[in-house]
């Protein structure tokens, strides 16, 4: 408000308080002569004086914009009598002498405060309806009632709410009882890309359409990216000149009385300030499998009790959340918009870098700008990004996504390279093709238009099938290391649940976190999740099939990189094979391959002594077995304080074979080194 309005508002308050003072004095002086000890009120107040003061008050209220008390009465629906009660209570703070006048008017020196009884006697337009719990004075908590045990309501002390007194003085700020629950969401300085601007328009139109149906028009914003939803929501609120506040639904009080107070205070604030509320239900939605049962939740009850403009951020749309609701899906910017954001952030010469980053990662514009700014601030890029600076930006993107994945799966630190992997040439070539497809996704999908033809199956998925120990996990590590991505092994104990719907919920969270592009998902023992659907004989079969059906759909829509590993390819549902881009078979290594594995089994810094690789390759062992034998032999050598020798390797091999209950012929593990006979 302008200074002129504040001056006019103060003039109105002064006139209103003068009228109230004269009215109290006239009422106090009415009746019998003053009792002994009662202070003299001075000259009597005439009806003409009160009428003149009332006309002055009405004249001061006629300006535009309206004084705060008049505006408040219009917005909250106060009757003239209720407006006068509020003025009487606020006068206790605005004019300290009002308390003494109240005591005189009530003829009780021990009651220097306003009461309903005083107001009913004092004002000519008194109405008993003002005392009702649903009256605006009490419903909106404009006044506070201090009712002592056994005391009538009409004789209880009244006090104006502190927030309302400040409002009457022209200080319009958020109620401090709500501040601990809310966080202000500023409108981002950067403009949104075109696709998200269209989403903002959908939200604004949804509010407008629902406003005629409900006092609490609600637009749901489903989607996995909370930051994107908040940014879009802030722009939508800003489009209507409103300030957006965020309230996590977990902070809503579960007790009905406390929840109702919060709902009424927010509704009051939405009438006094240009506000909109974003209810953040992402965390609660992830924790609650039954998202539809919202009426029994504080969030559902809060929306039912409240008024204003509301947005509800969820992972998936809630079926029933209030009297009127619309659903607007919020997605990250389109790939072309992300590429433009990278180019704007990185500067000239960044076309190739932008293509690679866009093809792998899925970020909003704010995150892209933040990553580029952070890299530039560290001196790693100089505003003319070149292909040589791609690894720095790539690692920065992966670091942004990592915290989301760490809470859902086990990260595997990968140090293996292509040189460490021993596979048949055909399988090795397929694995390299997989890595090349990851690098060329932007070119094929977006530049060449394949993404427009295939709305699904844009992810890269592979099946690694073969006996245990044949290198499936190592191949996944090599792939992740080569692509500079984090490898996450899916912990089945954290995903699979005996509770209905929990497994699907856990998988949903996992895929959503991985779709930003910084991870390779590794489903070890995949047959436990991706097994064949069975004939439905009971409810357990039905729900097991539902889980598999969900996985089939989710794998087809997944846009990231997923690797399934299994020892039993035949146990997988055939429908998964169609959805997999690559199928690699890891055979039991032949003698030549076993020799190559043995040659790489010991690190270069390990001291070895005349190892017979040809004899070691004669053992029918997998790569995993060879790794265990080499490690155990190294510990035996360290204990003996000598290099790794053939006797120690053979001893470790005997232990490994016995552990796996494989046939052991002692002659195979005996070492008789031939010694040359002197001539």
Image: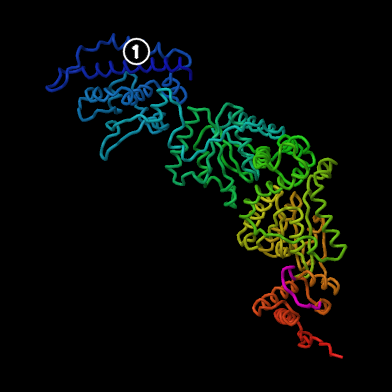
Residue 132 visible within the image: yes
Tell me which corner region of the image, top left, top right, bottom left or bottom right, holds residue 261.
top left
User: Where residue 523 sits: x, y (%)?
Assistant: 71, 60
Counting labels gives 1
Q: Residue at x 80, y 62 (%)?
A: 419
Residue 330 visible within the image: no
User: Where residue 140 sits: x, y (%)?
Assistant: 42, 31
Residue interval drawn in magenta: 602-612
Q: Which residue is drawn at 45% across and 34% down?
A: 265
Q: Nearer the viewer, residue 590 or 88?
A: 590
Q: Nearer the viewer, residue 616 or 214?
A: 616
Vertical order, 603 against 370 (above or below): below
User: Where residue 187 sits: x, y (%)?
Assistant: 59, 32
Tell me which corner region of the image, top left, top right, bottom left or bottom right, holds residue 346.
top right
User: Where residue 425 sits: x, y (%)?
Assistant: 87, 63
Residue that carries the numbered disc 1 in the rendered image: 54
Vertical order, 352 against 32 (above or below): below
Q: Which of 289 and 678 is in front in this view?
A: 678
Label 1, secondary structure: give it.
helix
In the current view of this chain or complex, which residue is farthest to the front? 679
Q: Which colour scheme is used?
A: rainbow
Q: For this view, does 533 lie left or right of residue 265?
A: right
Secondary structure that dominates the magenta span: loop
């Amino acid at each position: 408000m302008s200074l002129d309005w504040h001056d006019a508002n103060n003039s109105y308050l002064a006139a209103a308080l003068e009228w109230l003072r004269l009215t109290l004095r006239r009422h106090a002086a009415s009746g019998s002569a003053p009792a002994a000890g009662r202070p003299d009120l001075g000259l009597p107040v005439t009806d003409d004086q009160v009428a003149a003061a009332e006309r002055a008050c009405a004249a001061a209220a006629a300006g535009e914009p309206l004084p705060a008390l008049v505006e408040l009465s219009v917005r909250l629906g106060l009757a003239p009598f209720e407006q006068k009660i509020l003025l009487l209570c606020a006068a206790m703070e605005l004019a300290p002498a009002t308390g003494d006048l109240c005591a005189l008017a009530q003829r009780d020196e021990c009651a220097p405060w306003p009461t309903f009884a005083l107001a009913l006697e004092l004002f000519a337009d008194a109405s008993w309806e003002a005392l009702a719990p649903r009256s605006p004075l009490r419903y909106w908590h404009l006044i506070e009632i201090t009712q002592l045990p056994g005391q009538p309501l009409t004789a209880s002390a009244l006090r104006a709410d502190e927030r309302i007194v400040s409002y009457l003085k022209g200080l319009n700020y958020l109620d401090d009882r709500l501040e601990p629950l809310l966080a202000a969401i500023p409108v981002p300085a950067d403009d949104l890309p075109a696709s998200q601007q269209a989403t903002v328009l959908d939200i604004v139109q949804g509010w407008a359409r629902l406003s005629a149906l409900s006092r609490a028009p609600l637009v749901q914003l489903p989607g996995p990216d909370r930051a994107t939803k908040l940014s879009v929501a802030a722009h939508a609120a800003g489009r209507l000149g409103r300030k957006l506040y965020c309230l996590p639904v977990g902070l809503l009080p579960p007790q009905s009385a406390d929840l109702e107070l919060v709902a009424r205070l927010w509704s009051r604030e939405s009438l006094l300030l240009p506000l909109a509320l974003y209810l953040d239900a992402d965390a609660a939605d992830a924790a609650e499998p039954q998202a539809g049962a919202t009426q029994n939740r504080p969030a559902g009850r809060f929306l039912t009790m409240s008024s204003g403009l509301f947005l509800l951020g969820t992972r998936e749309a809630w079926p029933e959340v209030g009297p009127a609701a619309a659903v607007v899906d919020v997605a990250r910017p389109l790939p072309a918009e992300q590429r433009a954001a990278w180019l704007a952030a990185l500067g000239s010469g960044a076309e190739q870098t932008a293509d690679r980053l866009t093809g792998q990662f899925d970020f909003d514009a704010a995150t892209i700008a933040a990553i580029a700014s952070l890299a530039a601030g560290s001196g790693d890029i100089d505003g003319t990004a070149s292909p040589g600076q791609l690894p720095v930006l790539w690692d920065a993107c992966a670091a942004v996504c990592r915290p989301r994945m760490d809470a859902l799966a086990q990260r595997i630190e990968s140090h293996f390279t292509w040189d460490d992997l021993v596979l048949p040439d055909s399988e090795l070539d397929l694995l390299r093709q997989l890595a090349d497809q990851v690098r060329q996704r932007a070119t094929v999908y977006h530049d060449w238009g394949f993404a427009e033809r295939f709305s699904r199956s844009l992810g890269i998925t592979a099946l690694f099938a073969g006996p245990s120990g044949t290198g499936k996990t190592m191949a996944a590590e090599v792939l992740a290391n080569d692509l500079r991505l984090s490898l996450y092994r899916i912990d089945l104990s954290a995903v699979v649940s005996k509770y209905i719907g929990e497994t699907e919920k856990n998988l949903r969270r996992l895929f959503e976190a991985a779709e930003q592009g910084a991870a390779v998902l590794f489903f070890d023992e995949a047959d436990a999740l991706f097994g064949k659907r069975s004939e439905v004989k009971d409810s357990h079969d039905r729900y097991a099939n539902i889980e598999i059906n969900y996985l089939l759909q989710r794998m087809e829509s997944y846009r990231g990189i997923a690797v399934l590993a299994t020892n039993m390819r035949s146990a997988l549902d055939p429908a998964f094979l169609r959805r997999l881009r690559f199928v690699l078979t890891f055979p039991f290594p032949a003698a030549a391959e076993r020799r190559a594995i043995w040659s790489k089994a010991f690190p270069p810094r390990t001291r070895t002594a005349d190892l017979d690789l040809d004899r070691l390759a004669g053992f029918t062992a997998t790569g995993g077995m060879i790794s265990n034998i080499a490690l155990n032999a190294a510990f035996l050598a360290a204990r003996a304080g000598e290099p790794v020798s053939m006797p120690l390797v053979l001893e470790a091999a005997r232990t490994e074979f016995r552990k796996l209950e494989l046939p052991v012929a002692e002659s195979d593990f005996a070492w008789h080194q031939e010694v040359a006979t002197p001539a």
